[in-house]
Amino acid sequence: MKPIKPALFALSCATLFAACEVNTPNAATTQADDADAITAPIPGDAYKLALSLVGKPLPAADGKTITYQVLVENKGSAPVYGVGKADGSMAVDIGEMVLGDGDNVDGNGGSRDFTRVHLPLLAPGQAAVVAVNVPAAPRLDGRKLRLATVQEGVAWHEDDGSIDLGPFKLDGEGKFAGVPVTK
């Protein structure tokens, strides 16, 4: 009976990974398409998400992407979802921020708007593993990324379990030169 449990766990993880991989800002549906869409700001005392890395980062064979598996746990009292209003506001996403000078997103070279990953619907107490793809972009060379949750148009939640990755190094061909250390 013991050999069955690891197989079921692997199958469950593979299903979650496949279902949660979204990395483009326009991939989410809108409230008109989805009755579970978030349409109002989530109160601060109801919003509590924890992020943690699962497993090792996976570099693509072509060296142009590294995929991190991130466990997202909803420890708050409100549901979260990467689907919001028609204009994209109110959705809850993982934001990838480029850290500038002094490892500060607001420092020289920093940016809050690198990429987004839309979260699956997570009721209070639920968790999911989400694939976060980091593209090899020139502005990442020598810099770190911070993964943090954001309710679009409302607030960033960097203090609630954000994850710093990097620094990233690119080679002369615009590919990742190795997999960076994570914290």
Image (spheres, rainbow, N blue to C red):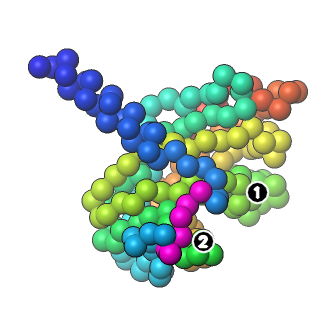
Name the residue that disc number 1 marks: 110
Residue 39 appears in view: yes
Question: Does residue 32 sit above or below 128 in this rendering?
Answer: below
The nearer-to-camera label among 1 and 2 is 2
Residue 96 appears in view: no
Residues in magenta? 27-32
Q: Position of residue 150 (x, y in %)?
A: 55, 65
User: Is residue 30 within the magenta segment?
Assistant: yes
Question: Does residue 147 sit above or below 134 in this rendering?
Answer: below
Q: Which residue lies at the image location 38% right of the left edge and 49% below the top edge?
A: 128
Q: In the picture provided, is 58 more to the left or to the right than 174?
A: left
Q: Position of residue 151 (x, y in %)?
A: 53, 70
Name the residue that disc number 2 marks: 88
Give the residue furthest to the left: 1
The span from disc 1 to disc 2 (Cα, nearest Å) is 23 Å
Considering the image in quadrants, where does the N terminus appear? top left
Give the residue furthest to the right: 172
Residue sitting nearer the eye, 102 or 174 = 174
Considering the image in quadrants, where does the C terminus appear? top right
Q: Which residue lies at the image location 30% right of the left edge and 71% below the top edge?
A: 77
Amino acid type indicated by mark 1 = Gly
Q: Which residue lies at the image location 46% right of the left edge and 61% below the top edge?
A: 160
As helix, strand or loop, the secondary structure at mark 1 comes to: loop
